[in-house]
Amino acid sequence: MTSNKVDARKSLRVTLDDAERVLTRPKGWWACLTCLFLAKRISTYLVNNTKITANQVTAFSLVLSIFCALAIFKGPEWYIYGALFYWMSYLFDCVDGTVAR
């Protein structure tokens, strides 16, 4: 049964148009300005070239969120790193939805 899923996944090719169709659903201004351009390309790469699942992308986003919290608690000199980890976590949150679809 798992070999059928692997074979089906190998035969599935996703284009940037497919990713854009999924990502063009109504999003907030933050997503439109900062994440969707990269999310399309990352999603297309992950689906076509790797065996990474949406759950694994979600777990990675969670790890980035934890790093964000740690950086913010570390103090003011770490706020820029916290903001960067927050943005990356949000980016991969957008990616996991696209990979799942």
Image (cartoon, helix red, strand yellow):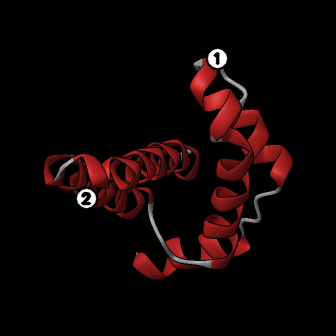
| Residue at the disc numbered 1 | 26
- Considering the numbered disc 1 on the image, is that residue within a helix, a strand or a loop? loop
Depth check, front residue: 6 or 56: 56
- On the image, the x and y values in percent for residue 43 come to 64, 57
Q: Quadrant of residue 71?
A: bottom left
Depth check, front residue: 79 or 60: 79
- Considering the numbered disc 2 on the image, is that residue within a helix, a strand or a loop? helix
Q: Is 43 located above or below residue 91 in the figure?
A: below
Name the outermost residue toward the left: 73
Name the outermost residue toward the front: 77
Depth check, front residue: 2 or 25: 25
Q: Is 30 located above or below residue 77 in the figure?
A: above
* Gap between marks 1 and 2 measured at Cα: 28 Å
- Residue found at x 27% / y 60%: 63
Q: Is residue 46 left or right of residue 84?
A: right
Looking at the figure, which quarter contains the C terminus?
top right
Q: Is 55 located above or below residue 25 in the figure?
A: below
* Amino acid on which the number 1 mark rests in the picture: Pro
* Amino acid on which the number 2 mark rests in the picture: Phe
Circle 1 crowding by C-alpha within 10 Å: few under 14, some 14–19, many from 20 = few
Q: Quadrant of residue 18?
A: top right
Circle 2 crowding by C-alpha within 10 Å: few under 14, some 14–19, many from 20 = some
- Residue found at x 77% / y 65%: 13
Q: Is residue 41 left or right of residue 87?
A: right
Dot label at residue 38: none
Dot label at residue 67: 2
Looking at the figure, which quarter contains the N terminus?
bottom left
